[in-house]
Image: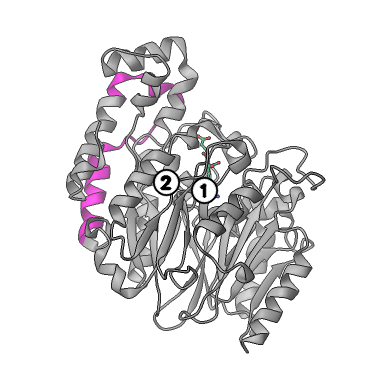
Amino acid sequence: MSMIELNMDGLVGPSHHYAGLSHGNLASTKNAHKVANPKAAALQGLDKMKYLHDLGLSQCVFPPPPSPRLSVLKTLGFSGSNTKIIEDCARTAPELLSPIYSSAAMWAANAACVSAPMDTQDGKTHITPANLNSTFHRSLETSDTTRILKMIFSDENYFIHHPSLPSHPYFADEGAANHCRLWFDAEVPGISLFIYGRSAYQSGMRQPQKFPARQTLEASQAIARSHGLNTDLCFFIQQNPEAIDQGAFHNDVVSVTHKNIMFCHEQAFLAQDALHQRLTAIFAAHEETLYWIEVPAKRITLADAIKSYIFNSQIITTSQNKVILLVPEECRETIQVWDYLNELVLDHHCPFSEIKTVDLSQSMRNGGGPACLRLRIPLIPDALDSVYSGVFFSHELDRQLRLWIHTHYRDRLHVEDLADPLLLREVQEALYSLSRILHFDSLYDL
Ligand code: SUG
């Protein structure tokens, strides 16, 4: 059984804005209430998708969820026409507008935790949408994410969709951002690393003092169980509380894996040396090499790693077997980081042959780099034809989406603009039009 990895990037929605909704995410707090440019944000995301597609990756688009989430406002007691609901909310509870207009679903790494078919007992790809219940605005994503993932990966011969975990802080789950997979051979089971920040039931664990730990151990364990993973190949690792306190609200801000490569900061995990040794031993037992690239704090501090998002990178193997590290443009602007990366590519023991930067500044200002924007879907080649065809990236889809963005997106959006009922009409029209481009009639029931 061989494997393909589908790369699914979130398409930035037309109401992308900066509201400072994520405590512990330094970029979100720092850029709160700045003017956003949804048009540029969506185009930057498309540029990234085009780059990956042109490298030969199987690239898909993850459509934005319905917006604004008027159903949430109705549940919270607002009624009347759509315009009246927005006006009443703006007048009496303006703090609710940003959560219901949030376009945070663009960070597809938080959409779900996905297990590869060779790792699961039944040989199928298993998907659990994340409950994202650490933040109110993100918790609103789960029901739409569940529905959209089921529509795209609908064939039960290949995909198993699990319900999201109980939406309680004990089972707080942030999806693939806190899950890594390492493997040496596409045909055999790989290793799952589940990275948690706290435990609901185990006391005495070291905890961050300043910022919340989002993922729980119990959520990770539940996913490993329901996906039918081999427990010998699952590692549950605590994220370093110090990293969380410095702003690593998700593990993918301080580490990234790809095949047999782990690229991480020295202070990413607790008991990091022990993890390194155990993984090296597993790889050695299979006569395979683990590339463990750990960046010392004396070369790059946690603060600089988080500012530049060097580890929120994407590692890509091209069809010519070249390994590219795709990092945000901000890495070039942080001198220690840029110097380190340039040394790294020259090191013969390092698998990276090229460092490529990408401009995702609009997403970065809310704490989302290249890795946050993508969800990896491992599947067997036979499953590919069953994936909903309208979401596959192509030059023609790229052309249509660019035209659509230029037609429907604003180039300035401030959190106060969310009170404007005209925005409601604009966003809804944009999404209707998108459902036609993707031939996805049932996507938006606005
Ligand atoms: O959950 N930011 C997102 C960023 C998610 C990044 N994803 C990964 N690391 N995988 C978050 O904190 C900010 C929204 C605002 O403040 O307007 C926000 O939701």
Q: Is residue 397 above or below residue 381?
A: above
Q: At 17% across and 45% down in the image, what residue appears?
A: 436
Q: Is 410 part of what is drawn in magenta?
A: yes
Name the quarter where the N terminus is drawn: bottom left
Q: Is mark 2 within 8 Å of ligand 1?
A: no
Q: Is residue 186 above or below residue 163?
A: below
Q: Is residue 27 above or below residue 70?
A: below
Which labelled disc corresponds to residue 161?
Answer: none
Picture coordinates of residue 34, whole percent (x, y): 51, 31
Residue picked out by circle 1? 368
Please identify the quarter of the rendering in which residue 367 is found.
Answer: top right
Picture coordinates of residue 398, whole percent (x, y): 26, 56
Q: Is residue 63 visible?
A: no
**Badge 2: residue crowd in 10 Å (few <14, some 14–19, many ≥20):** many
Q: At 31% across and 26% down in the image, what residue appears?
A: 423
Amino acid type of the residue that numbered disc 1 sits on in the rendered structure = Gly
Where disc 1 sits, the SS reads loop
Q: Is mark 1 within 8 Å of ligand 1?
A: yes
With 225 as the anchor, is 140 left or right in this view? left
**Badge 1: residue crowd in 10 Å (few <14, some 14–19, many ≥20):** many
Magenta stretch: dominant secondary structure: helix
The furthest residue to the right = 204
Whichever of labels 2 and 1 marks the residue nearer the N terminus, that label is 2
The magenta segment? 396-423
Q: At 60% across and 53% down in the image, what residue appears?
A: 220
Please identify the quarter of the rendering in which residue 191 is found.
Answer: bottom right
Picture coordinates of residue 174, whole percent (x, y): 54, 47
Q: Is residue 157 above or below residue 20?
A: below
Q: Are marks 2 and 1 in contact (CB under 8 Å)?
A: yes
Which labelled disc corresponds to residue 106?
Answer: 2
